[in-house]
Amino acid sequence: MALSTNTSNDLLFRLTAKHPQGLANYRVIVQSAAELGDIQNSPSVSMGPYLITSEQTRLLTTLSVYSLRGDSREKLRLLYMNATALRIWKEMGKQPTEAGSQHRPPHAATLCFGVPFSE
């Protein structure tokens, strides 16, 4: 009986190559110091009232936004938004600077609005 030399990482890399979009659940949004000067650029402050006034409160259980401190004035805060949160953010007239995508937020990121990610 021959043993396979493939590792679980080999399998993961093959699967992500075949389905790259399926694993990127969160878009990374970069916010600068200038953007953070406006409190309305904080999802935890502005998204709730927007959902209420636009009568979309049913989406509260599907939104997921995490936050992580950046490392420069141009990247002062990183937001990790799922597709629903990003759609709402854009509906609100925000023009997010997208810097990539990933399967889930980093462990150090803090949930700042919505519900935790689930799989």
Image: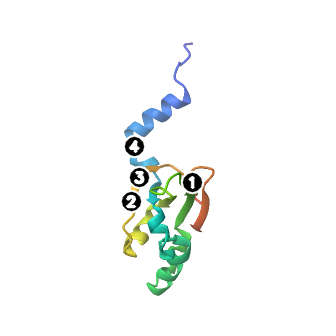
Q: Earlier in the sequence, mark 1 or mark 2?
A: 2
Question: At numbered mark 2, what does the secondary structure look like: helix, strand or loop?
Answer: strand
Q: What crowding class fits label 4: few (fewer than 14 Cα within 10 Å), some (14-19), or many (20 or more)?
A: few
User: Disc 4 designates what residue?
Assistant: 19
Q: Amino acid at mark 4?
A: His
Which disc is residue 67 wearing? none
SS at badge 1: loop
Name the one closer to the observer, 1 or 49. Answer: 49
Q: Indicate the quadrant containing the C terminus: top left, top right, bottom left or bottom right.
A: bottom right
Are there few (<14), some (14-19), or many (20+) residues within 10 Å of tag 1?
Answer: few
Q: Residue at x 52, y 68 (%)?
A: 62
Instruction: Return the mark for residue 99.
Output: 3
Q: CA distance from mark 4 to mark 1?
A: 16 Å
**Amino acid type, residue under disc 1 in the picture:** Glu
Look at 62% across and 59% down and name the residue there: 110
Mark 4 / mark 1, whichever is N-terminal:
4
Q: How is the image coloured?
A: rainbow
Q: From the image, which quarter does the N terminus lie in? A: top right
Could you give the CA–CA distance between mark 4 and mark 3, rounded to whole angstroms?
Answer: 20 Å
